[in-house]
Amino acid sequence: MSPSLHDRLQQLRRPAAGSALESLERELLSPPALAEGEILPLKARLQRLVAVAAQKERERRRAPAPVPLEELVDGMRVENERGEFFRVDSGVHLEVRHGDVPLSRVQAIAPDTVRVLSGQPELEGFDLRRAVFLDTETTGLAGGSGTAAFLVGLGWFEGERFRVRQCFMRDYHEEPALLCGVAEELARFAQVVTFNGKMFDLPLLETRFRLNRERYPLAGARHLDLLHPARRLWKARLESCRLQALEVELMGLRRTGDLPGEEIPQVYFDWVRRRDAGRLARVFEHNRQDIVSLAALAVHACRWVEEGSAEDPRDLYSLGRVLERAREFEKSETQYTRALAAGAGAVRGPALVRLAWRAERSGRHQRALALWREAAEAGEPLALRQLAIHHEHRTRDYAAALAAVERGLALVEGDDGSEVGRRDLRRSRLAEAFARRRKRLLRKASRSPAAGTPPGPGSAPAS
């Protein structure tokens, strides 16, 4: 025979369970303080539970009704062989400026510019006008097989407009249909542009396609990830190279009412649970802005490379590095020289080093020596290493070589605080090279203390 309700309450009143029951009542019902040993009758407890339930129901009814997605987002339901998903189409005219950047400039970009910008020979002839610009909003920011892309935004140039198409899964069961729809769109493109897509968006999409047993449509596409060129061009000057920071600093664009990216996964979870599109509409706008900004940034970066429009010495030096990486040596030397003429500041030493390397490799040894000396005076350890090589192997002035080594070691071990120098010189390896050279110089000087006569005409420096 099953125990009666009275028996169950009696069991709950036992000391082992009493404290837990009373704690639960205090949390849910907030009863007034009871005298020691006093137990609230069952009827009073039930009355309180009914009162709490009625209060919760009144609060639920006062809460605004969930807003349907179609009322806030102008889109349509799309069906395919894998099911149904939601799609939004929009666009902007190319003559409309995105911040300070007119998208119409894409028409004048030279075919070789993307290769120079990225430093990737395989992007020779990459045409932004025939590329798809891609950005995803996901259920998590860490990636992995448990993270899904619930919104995939695509953009492309078409005639006089830049089109944006956003594919959205209203619930998890719509993912196969969404991926099928995205694959149909991507099949038209052999070139893709992203911002950090190399590490996040594309691997995530590839994983989702594989989990759904679908062919990944971008397997053979050429990929321009704008995050890396942006860092090379502007990191020396800007604190952040996030897309929204570049919008402000480079394009003069400030978003109003934008949803922070870290909040987006929770907004989607809330949508799945409550079906209220109030905040979800802001996710669509955030994604649309990202897509258009991605296109505008690509146009701006290409113009930056083509026109050499930098003015800040840090930008001039960074542009020189981008051009040198693409083996555009004459153009890169021009930018390093402009950086020095503009005052250079923190990049003066690195600019002198780059110019000295170019002079050395083109056979202008005297010019290189003068630049190494100037860079050494600016506190560049690499220049001191080259001077030590010169004195050890060309002039055989071991004392001068040893002095250069000692000064270089002091700079490397003391860390002069130069961000550009610390990044380019790989100080730990340089310190080891200085230490080995000092040991060798001390040994040579002990064997030939009077050495100091220059070598014969056929002598050449060694590393």
Image (spheres, rainbow, N blue to C red):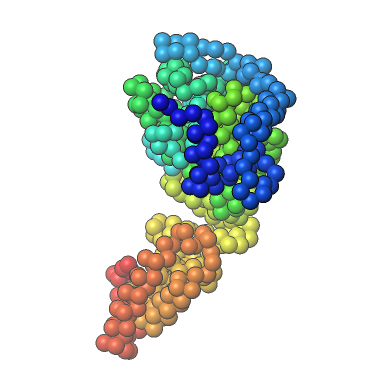
In the picture, residue 115 is in which quadrant? top left
Q: Nearer the viewer, residue 165 or 26?
A: 26
Residue 303 shows in this picture: no
Q: Which of the image's four quarters has the N terminus?
A: top left
Residue placed most toward the observer, 436 or 455: 436
Q: Is residue 242 above or below residue 455?
A: above
Residue with the most extreme left position = 447
Relative image position of residue 88 (x, y in whole percent): 58, 18
Residue closer to the observer: 341 or 253: 253
Left or right side of 7 for 237: right
Q: Please, is residue 426 above or below residue 373 in the view?
A: above
User: Residue at the spot x=35%, y=70% of the render?
Assistant: 432
- Name the spot of residue 76 as percent of width and height, x first: 58, 13
Position of residue 133 relative to residue 454, above or below, is above
Percent coordinates x, y for residue 120 in the rendering? 41, 40
Pick whichever, 361 or 352, lies toward us: 352
Which quadrant of the figure has residue 277?
top right
Residue at the (49%, 34%) spot, across then down? 8
As drawn, 376 above or below 208: below
Q: How many marks?
A: 0
Quadrant of the rendered structure where residue 459 is?
bottom left
Looking at the rendering, in which quadrant would you find the C terminus?
Answer: bottom left
Q: Position of residue 342 (x, y in %)?
A: 63, 57
Residue drawn at point x = 29 percent, y = 88 percent? 446
| Position of residue 81 in the picture relative to residue 442 (left or right) | right
Residue 240 visible somewhere in the drawing: yes
